[in-house]
Amino acid sequence: MYKPFLEHLEQSLFQKFDLQTCPIPAGLEHQVSDRGKNPATIRSWHYRCPELRKIRYTYIDAGASAQIFNSVIYPSHHYELPLLGIDFLSFGQVKNLIVMDFQPLFQDESYLNKYIRPLKELHDKYPDLAQDLEMKFYDANQYFSKYLLFAKTDSETVKTRVFDAFKDYLTLYWRMLDTATPSSDPEDVRRIVKAQKNYDQYSADRDPASGLFSSYFGHAWAERFLYEFLFSDAVPLATGKAMR
């Protein structure tokens, strides 16, 4: 269901940036599960360029039972831009959950006005995809904007409205990156490094997809995937406790 989204993202990235392929830890780039009645394949991609320090996206194809596309784009530490977060999940062509947002690194008013306010126009364009659903695993006021798209919808809407919104959000993000001024101030860079690390830790500690990965590929693989690839700046909880 989400292959056109992946293809559009790749086309946009390769046309706009001078991408460098980044290594993915051994065994995590591609995996096939033969557990249960519905075999699943997971594949991930990882790139970087001068403007974007980490571009990662993952596709899970479990046939008719599940189709999942997830991506996070991290700007260079010289930019205080939000992260671009994308999470599209479909189960059995009936349950379709879409999440897309410019994920703010900071919550002060000047930052939100500069980097989140431009989203309002797009948010208003897709009211049917902004359903104000309850977040069960995350604090909606932390690393999410008030203009996120968050909806349960049908498969036809995914192919039309969601795809249009996806292209619009991506276009706006590239435009904001084009007009952003990188900072060479060491204090600014340290602040951004810390904020992006905090995002990884927060996300890894709460990511509900960990259980899904475990069900398909086993707990050990899922833990490696979570901490060595998806949120590689995070420290596993047990390790973090041991270090304190």
Image (tube, grey):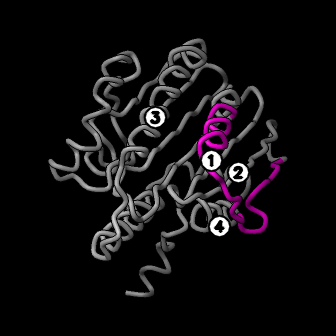
Q: In this view, which residue lies farthest toward the left?
A: 109
CB within 8 Å, label 1 to label 3: no
> Of marks 3 and 2, which one's residue comes earlier in the chain?
2
- The residue wearing badge 1 is 57
The amino acid pointed to by label 2 is Ser
Disc 3 target residue = 99
> How far apart are the alpha carbons under marks 2 and 4?
14 Å
Q: From what the image shows, is residue 42 above or below residue 239? A: above
Q: Earlier in the sequence, mark 2 or mark 1?
A: 2
| Relative height, residue 22 to residue 63 (above, below) | below
Three-letter residue code for mark 4 = Arg
Spatial CA distance of label 1 from label 3 is: 14 Å
Helix or strand or loop: what does disc 3 sit on? strand
User: CB under 8 Å between callouts 3 and 4?
Assistant: no
Cβ–Cβ under 8 Å for marks 2 and 4: no
- Describe the element under mark 1 as helix, strand or loop: strand
Kind of residue indicated by mark 3: Val
Relative to 212, say whether 38 is above or below.
Answer: above
For mark 4, what is the residue? Answer: 224
Q: Which residue is mark 2?
A: 44
Stretch in magenta = 7-33
Percent across and percent down for residue 48 are: 60, 58
Residue 191 placement: quadrant: bottom left
Quarter that holds the N terminus: top right
- For image coordinates 45% across by 86% down, the residue present is 242
